[in-house]
C-alpha cells in the first residue's frame, strides 16, 4: 500500500462514527446458524442439529429433513470472552441429540457420545440475545428461540422445559457485537 493510501485510511478512521475494515473484523459475530433436522423414529420425532453444510448433508443422508434455523450462535473461534463452547452429544440407545455446554463426563456415563463443539453460546443475557429454550420428551431434545414454538411444544406436544435455571442465550438473526469484543 502506498503512503498516500495509508494516510487517507488513517485520516478517514478519525472521522466521528467511522470504522475501518480491520475494526469490523475484530468484532465477535454470531453468524453460525444452528439448523434443525427431524425424522420419525418409533412413531415420534428425533431432532438433530447442524452448523455446517456438510453436517446437514450427513443428516439428510440418514433420513433427516431440514426444518429451519433454531438460532444463531458464535463460531468456535469467536473473540467474545462471554461465549462458552456448545457441544452436540448423541445417545444411540435413546436416539437423542442434545446440545450442552458442559458435564460431558457425566453425559458419557449416561450413554451420550460427544460429537464435538458446534459453536459458542452465552450463559447470560446480552444486548440482542434471547433465551434458547431447551425442551425434552422421551424421544429427545428440541431447541428454539421462539416463545410461541416453546409454548406449542410444551402444551400440545408433551415436551418439558429443561435448563430453566441456567438457560443458554443465542440470537434470532445474525448479530455483530457492538462492544468491539
Image (tube, rainbow, N blue to C red):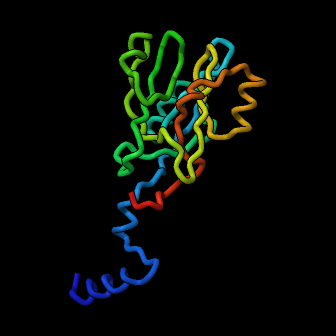
Q: Give the x, y percent position of residue 124.
A: 50, 41
Residue at position x 66%, y 21% in the image: 160
Q: Is 104 placed above or below 54 here?
A: above
Image coordinates of residue 162 in percent, x first then y, are 59, 24
Is residue 8 positioned above or below 115 on the image?
Answer: below
Residue 125 lies in quadrant: top right
Q: Quadrant of the N terminus?
A: bottom left
The C terminus - image quarter: bottom left
Instruction: Locate residue 69: give its quadrant.
Output: top right
Residue at image position (78%, 24%) is 156
Task: Please state if 5 lies on the left or on the right of 12 as rendered.
Answer: left
Q: In this view, does 137 lie above or below 121?
A: above
Residue at x 42%, y 40% (from the top left corner): 119
Name the foreground residue: 176 vs 43: 176
Is 140 placed left or right of 80 in the picture? right
Task: Name the spot of residue 179 as percent of width and height, x first.
Answer: 44, 60
Amino acid at each position: 500500500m502506498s503512503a498516500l493510501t495509508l494516510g487517507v485510511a488513517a485520516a478517514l478512521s478519525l472521522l466521528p462514527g467511522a470504522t475501518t475494515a480491520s475494526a469490523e473484523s475484530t468484532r465477535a459475530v454470531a453468524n453460525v446458524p444452528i439448523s434443525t433436522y427431524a425424522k420419525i423414529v418409533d412413531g415420534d420425532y428425533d431432532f438433530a442439529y447442524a452448523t455446517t453444510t456438510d453436517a446437514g448433508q450427513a443428516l439428510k443422508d440418514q433420513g433427516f429433513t431440514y426444518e429451519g434455523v433454531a438460532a444463531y450462535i458464535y463460531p468456535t473461534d469467536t473473540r467474545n470472552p462471554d461465549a462458552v463452547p456448545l457441544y452436540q452429544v448423541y445417545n444411540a440407545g435413546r436416539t437423542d441429540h442434545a446440545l450442552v455446554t458442559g458435564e460431558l463426563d457425566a453425559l458419557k456415563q449416561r450413554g451420550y457420545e460427544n460429537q464435538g463443539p458446534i459453536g459458542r453460546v452465552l450463559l447470560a443475557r446480552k444486548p440482542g440475545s434471547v433465551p434458547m429454550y431447551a425442551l425434552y420428551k422421551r424421544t429427545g431434545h428440541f431447541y428454539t428461540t421462539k416463545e410461541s414454538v416453546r409454548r406449542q411444544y410444551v402444551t400440545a406436544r408433551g415436551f418439558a422445559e429443561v435448563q430453566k435455571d441456567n438457560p443458554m442465550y443465542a440470537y434470532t438473526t445474525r448479530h455483530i457485537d457492538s462492544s468491539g469484543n
